[in-house]
Amino acid sequence: MLFETGAGAKVGSDLHARALRRLDALDQAVSLRDLDLPGMQFHRLQGKPIRYSLHINGPWCITFEWVEGDAYRIDLEQYH
């Protein structure tokens, strides 16, 4: 919802702009290498299914699955 409308009632103002920048990068990415940018702290998470993380702020990350060039099950969560 945040990416589609630019508004997310549950996303704090301290996370809003950074989350949108990362969601934009995720939308434009053609491969996972496109997400390995300075400041994003992109990395693969342990476990199954295979998921990845983009750091936002503090413990907040965008996590997602990557299937054939597209991100699925995208979540904003306190991962660490």
Image: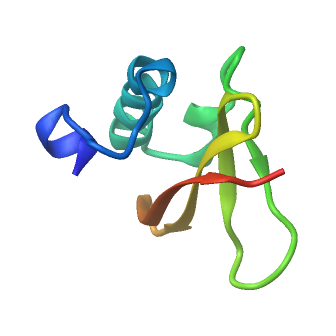
Question: Residue 24: which quarter of the image?
Answer: top left
Question: Residue 50: which quarter of the image?
Answer: bottom right
At a point 27% along the width and 42% down the height, the residue shown is 9
At a point 87% along the width and 69% down the height, the residue shown is 46
- Give left or right: position of 1 versus 76: left
How are the residues colored?
rainbow
Q: How many marks?
A: 0
Seen from this angle, which residue lies furthest left?
5
At a point 56% along the width and 67% down the height, the residue shown is 65
Does 70 appear above or below 78? below
Of 54 and 1, nearer the camera is 1
At a point 44% along the width and 31% down the height, the residue shown is 12
- Give left or right: position of 34 versus 58: left
Instruction: Estimate the x, y position of residue 80 in percent, counting from the top left.
Output: 84, 50
Does 11 appear above or below 73? above
- Give left or right: position of 78 versus 47: left
Seen from this angle, which residue lies furthest bottom?
48
Instruction: Estimate the x, y position of residue 66 in percent, counting from the top left.
Output: 53, 64
